[in-house]
Amino acid sequence: MELLQLRYFLTLARLEHVTEAAQSLHVTQSSLSKTIQRLEEDLGVPLFNRIGRKLRLNEYGKRFLHRAERALFELEQGKQELSDLSSPEYGTLELAVTAASKLPNILREFRKKRPNVQFHVQMLTTQEMVTLLHRGEVDFCLSSPSIQGDDIECQIVYLDPILVAVPKGHRLAEQSNVSLAELKDEWFVGVKKGYGTRDLVDSMCKSVGFAPKYVYEGDEPARLTALVEAEIGIAFIPSTARNPQEHICYLKLEDHELVREIALLWHKSRYISRIAQEFRNVVLEYFGSISKETM
């Protein structure tokens, strides 16, 4: 059994599509198929059910996938550990976020300490983040909501109140507080379902008897305030995402405590390099300073 066979199998098992897997691996479909065939011959069992051009993992494949993921995960951790020992000043941090409003500030603070470190950041839904966490493919996730799991470490770093953002000139703009019931006839702009803040807000509104009416649903939270300014709709905005330069009024909810947890997440078995440990310290220090400012 070869390492190449395991990598090809892992990609094909996740995509269950020969053409897409071959493109992802930058190999021909013929080469991919032959490599998988040799792996199945080595194992003595088929790993996929073939239905025309479609593939589905069978019971053998599902069981082997779990083992192959663990094996490649451990090899990758060994590679990272050796890289950390040989070049401690260099490296790449793999990050995934659903709570991104303060990430630029955090990265700026970290870069002051580690100017040679590169970043790869992905903005994901909660479920996409969980998948990467379970696979151990990211160093850290900055997430809202917090996520629990047998292989996931979760450290809540900040409790972030959610405010109601309305454009200046809106009927509510002169108020400092508002009840959820007052918002039932409003039009909203927000992120798509699957993001923690959106799911939290929808659940809270449902508890008082209405579902927010969205005229815009996207995957870029930073765009929402521009849409509010343009009077497209109002929005639920975390306090950490406020920008005092915008022509927006922020109202507190007076009858419900709507707070999102911002958590730092990592895989329990993933090797934590020195640069990753320093990044975690920067995150904790940054949110600690914000907490002191708001006390």
Image (spheres, helix red, strand yellow):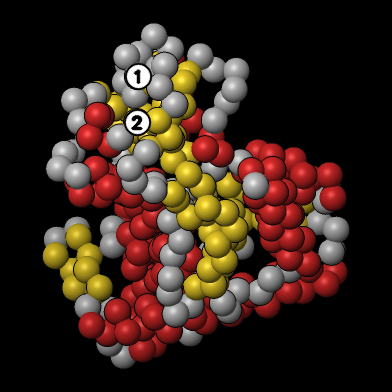
Q: Amino acid at mark 2?
A: Val
Q: Name the residue tied to disc 2.
A: 178
Of residues 115 and 106, the one drawn nearer to the viewer in this rendering: 106
Residue 145 found in image quarter: bottom left
For image coordinates 38% across by 37% down, the residue present is 253
Q: Name the residue tied to disc 1.
A: 172
Q: Is residue 256 above or below residue 233?
A: below
Answer yes or no: is residue 7 visible: no
Q: Is residue 118 above or below residue 21?
A: above
Q: Position of residue 275 (x, y in %)?
A: 77, 61
Within 10 Å of disc 1 (Cα), the crowding (few <14, some 14-19, many 20+) is some
For image coordinates 14% across by 65% down, the residue present is 51
Q: Position of residue 233 (x, y in %)?
A: 31, 20
Q: Position of residue 170 (x, y in %)?
A: 35, 13
Q: Which mark is residue 86?
A: none
For image coordinates 20% across by 31% down, the residue present is 184
Residue 45 found in image quarter: bottom left
Which SS class for mark 1?
loop
Answer yes or no: is residue 148 visible: yes
Label pair 1/2, CB-CB below 8 angstroms: yes
Relative horizontal placement of residue 180, taking residue 177 as reference (left or right): left
